[in-house]
Image: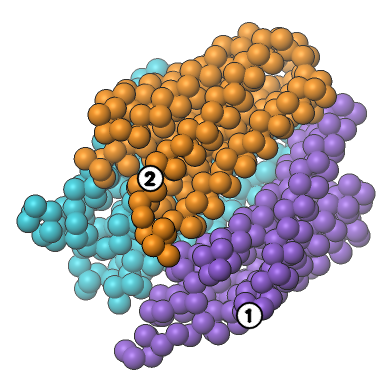
Chain colours: A purple, B cyan, C orange
Amino acid sequence: MISKLLPRGINFFDLFERQVGFAVEAARFFEQIVSRGHIDGNTLSRIQEIEHSGDEAAHAIIDQLNKTFITPFDREDIYNLTKQLDDVIDMINTIISRMKIYHITEVNMNLVEFAKVIEESVNAVARAIGGMRNRKDAKLVTAACIEIHRLENLGDTMRDRVLEDLFSKTTDPILVMKWKDIFQDAETVLDVCEDVAHVVDSILVKQA
Amino acid sequence: MISKLLPRGINFFDLFERQVGFAVEAARFFEQIVSRGHIDGNTLSRIQEIEHSGDEAAHAIIDQLNKTFITPFDREDIYNLTKQLDDVIDMINTIISRMKIYHITEVNMNLVEFAKVIEESVNAVARAIGGMRNRKDAKLVTAACIEIHRLENLGDTMRDRVLEDLFSKTTDPILVMKWKDIFQDAETVLDVCEDVAHVVDSILVKQA
Amino acid sequence: MISKLLPRGINFFDLFERQVGFAVEAARFFEQIVSRGHIDGNTLSRIQEIEHSGDEAAHAIIDQLNKTFITPFDREDIYNLTKQLDDVIDMINTIISRMKIYHITEVNMNLVEFAKVIEESVNAVARAIGGMRNRKDAKLVTAACIEIHRLENLGDTMRDRVLEDLFSKTTDPILVMKWKDIFQDAETVLDVCEDVAHVVDSILVKQA
């Protein structure tokens, strides 16, 4: 019982770093895939492995939350943070599955560019999470959050430009549907990274 | 005032069983409709009746929550549970409306199969809710939650297979759009059932 | 420190009225645009200005929330309310961007009708927010919330009718896709207004 009352903050930071590590891995893998433009059974099983490890890391955090009485920051923020990191990985997995389902085999340079922005954003998420451990790193965390917001805005602009192009130049409606979905999904990854930044921001403010 | 302080857990369990009963009715009705492939004014008014009863059951829970000081489990979990059960019924209603709007008249065997999985999942949700009343039923609840997760995974695989087929074989883009929406909605019902299972799981863990 | 403990409710009401004012402005601007059917660079920069002012109003509320110990109603309700008012403005901005991206230049009478319903609903949201300040205005608030629910139902019916028309009469699949997205977005504005009404309703009940 006493152990339940002891602050065990350090564990949460370790667990979050572990979870965000799988998001970084998923984003890097996604960038490699779209640059190659080829998806096969191995690709799918590799991303599903990463997603599975990410799920386990998320469950470990929820288990710890349910067992811990005093947490390093609001219980709800811990829950939201782990849920959103999980969403980042899920969303990357969703795009890859969709590319497989839609039989996408060509390299799309706009998607390659998007994948690089996603990788940058997930790396910034990892820096933000990593910096939460020490108050002296608050500036690093804030800088990472600002970077995540910038990349989300950039993604909005990129998606709008791609869709405008797609709708005015592509004559095959099935192709329009396919790429519209894929770029929408890609932009959603950046939205979810921004959700993480919002939670991290609000945790910093409460602790200030 | 004193009555406000008294535990009234029993009421919440009764109210939740009532609400989930309408979800079970909606799922059964949906399975009948898609097996018959015919939607008319009567079909729509019947599902709207069920949805309306479900809404009333949800409102009764929120009213009770606002009037009750001590609740059998976290207020937020009660709120989420009733909201998600409502979403299950709403989503089934959405698919039926969509089939009417899209003038779907044929029997689609993939959708029949999906409707059976939805019915199984909603039945498992009902077992999970029913078992929350007594701690000795914890194993039943856990088994029902595991079944809900299994059916959600099955639904993902089914939807992916249907979409892959649809995009590679159907040449009419309007038809692709219609069925894509319908199967996406169908999969969403299973997602919402899984959300219920997550809340039920976390209530069990907190009470353990 | 003492100032942190003082009730500062009045500020929150002022801040919410300021934020909802930008939603009213966005809805009025949207109605003007769709009646004119012409979107250019000026249109986009005007709606982005409104959205930016709305964002600042939302940030002011969150800042105030983080600095205030005693709030006029639940912290979570304050957070949800400001988030949802922000979503109203964002969603209107999204439709206007989409009309630009999809190169919509014609006046669509169904969309004009929809824009009028959106304007009515956002005006009702402003009345609900304005009435929260004084308990003697509770009836006004309730009436506004009922009006918001009515308009959301009306919007559902309108969207279903428009989609049924679109799918049965339009032969160009790309056009079907474009208008489907725009009317779906329009209906979502009414959904978000309804989310605001739900939060306002629940605040009233808790204070009764």
Residue shown at the point (32%, 41%) measured from the top left: C202
- Residue A25, image quadrant: bottom right
Give whichever of C190, C1 is nearer the camera: C1
Residue B49 locus on image (x, y percent): 30, 28
Q: Disc 2: which chain?
A: C
* Label 1 crowd (10 A; few <14 / some 14-19 / many >=20): few
User: Residue farthest to the left?
Assistant: B2
Type of amino acid under label 2:
Gly
Q: Label 2, on which residue?
A: C9
Measuring from the top left, give residue B115's x and y in whole percent. 47, 43
Type of amino acid under label 1: Asn
Q: CA distance from mark 1 to mark 2?
A: 34 Å
Answer left or right for B204 relative to A100: left
Q: Residue at x 52, y 62 (%)?
A: A80
In the rendered image, the vertical position of residue C138 relative to residue C106, given as above or below: below
- Of residues B183 and A126, which is closer to you in this image? A126
Residue shown at 64% from the left, 19% from the top:
C29
The picture quadrant where one finds residue A45 is bottom right
Q: Residue at x 12, y 54 (%)?
A: B4
Name the residue that disc number 1 marks: A134
